[in-house]
Amino acid sequence: MLKVAIIGAGAISGAHISAYLVFPDRCQIVAVVDMYPEKAQKRINEHGLENAQAVTDYKELLSQNIDVVSVCTPPYTHAPIACDFLHAGTHVLVEKPMASSLQEADQMLNAAQQSGKLLSVVAQNRFTTPMMKLKGVLDSELMGPIVHVQVDSFWWRGHNYYDLWWRGTWEKEGGGCTLNHAVHHIDAMLWMMGPPVELQAMMANTSHDNAEVEDVSMAMLRFREGAVGMITSSVVHHGEEQQLIFQGKEARVSAPWKVVASTARSNGFPEPNPELEQQIQQRVEELPDVVHVGHAGQIENVLNAIETGSTLLVDGESGRNTLELIVGIYKSASTGEKVTFPLGAEDPFYTREGIMKHAVHFYEKKTTVENFEDLSITLGSKLEP
């Protein structure tokens, strides 16, 4: 039985707790940590965690032989917490984004390598049937080489969203919608496409004058094999529609699911290709559905890796690759320059201090609250039809 601790009792912690409870024969939550002990105790009570203790300082657990922790704290705290537990011999699952800088991400990767323990970064959207099937179709190469990818990560957050004490600053949140909302769709795109070689970006803050960071950004990408792409990240889009569209030379597929295939008429205009559409649709229907969805699926993957040595679907390197692309967007949007990859330790945007110094500061925070009312949050669509 693996002993689990939840570090941070904010809104997202409930998703982690519920996911671990799906596997009661394999793991047991023994502690919930939060600087506000009443928040930790509330999570314990509402989930019926009879064997869990409420703890205010995670360092109290470093000597208690915890097997795995979920880090659900603000981004700027991820690196020190993860490194401390990894060095203490504990496997770590850390919420997105992996860290607030590439330097911190590299510190986490080094700690995992030195300790021999697992480091996984939450990307729960991979563990859904639409995403798994979309990945399977792309891997089949039925649609030919990819020529264009479109990522629309559209969310909506009210002005007061950035009143929370750690949000809306480059120092503590590490960025705005690109880092903290589009991160899931960027991760999925990289999983399916691989990394770009260069990008050009712009960003703005149109609706949240209580935040230093962006509330909308756009990036144009170029990939090594010649494909191009576009990522739009936003917390100003009503309706919160999200989609990934992959255009191949032979067909187009997307999540939410849609397949269209065309051939050329004698004049070059499109002619439907129902045969290829049916072939791709058949491939989708042959692929299995995901059994455990979202956080539960990722936690099952982590538990399997701990127990059997199987491969993590989302490891620390994946988390760093996603962060590097996002930092590239911030660099390009702040400097107006085209960015090429990789971003090395000498780059001005490699450290959190460098980002704080060089990134555009749109506004300064005007109001700060310690906690919001404990309401449900939106985790994004499952990208189903």
Image (tube, helix red, strand yellow):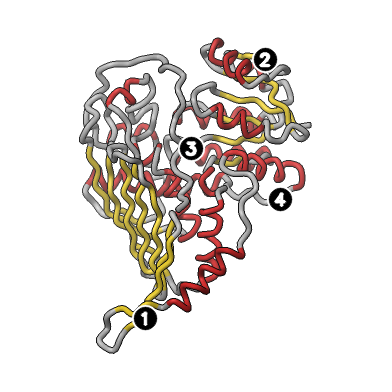
Q: Residue 107 placed where, x, y %? A: 53, 37
Q: Do the residues labelled 4 and 3 touch (CB within 8 Å)?
A: no
* Residue shown at the point (41%, 78%) measured from the top left: 273
The residues bearing labels 1 and 4 have C-alpha atoms spaced at a distance of 42 Å
* Residue type beneath disc 1: Thr
Spatial separation of the CA atoms under disc 1 and disc 3: 41 Å
Amino acid on which the number 4 mark rests in the picture: Ser
Split into 4 quadrants, where in the image is the N terminus? top right
The residue under the point 61% across, 43% down is: 298
Q: Which of marks 2 and 1 is in front?
A: 1
Nearest to N terminus: mark 3 or mark 2: 2
> Residue at label 1?
263
Count of labels in the image: 4
Where does label 3 land, which residue? 96
Q: Name the residue under label 2.
A: 53
Write down the residue under mark 4: 310
Residue drawn at (67%, 42%), measured in percent from left and top?
A: 300
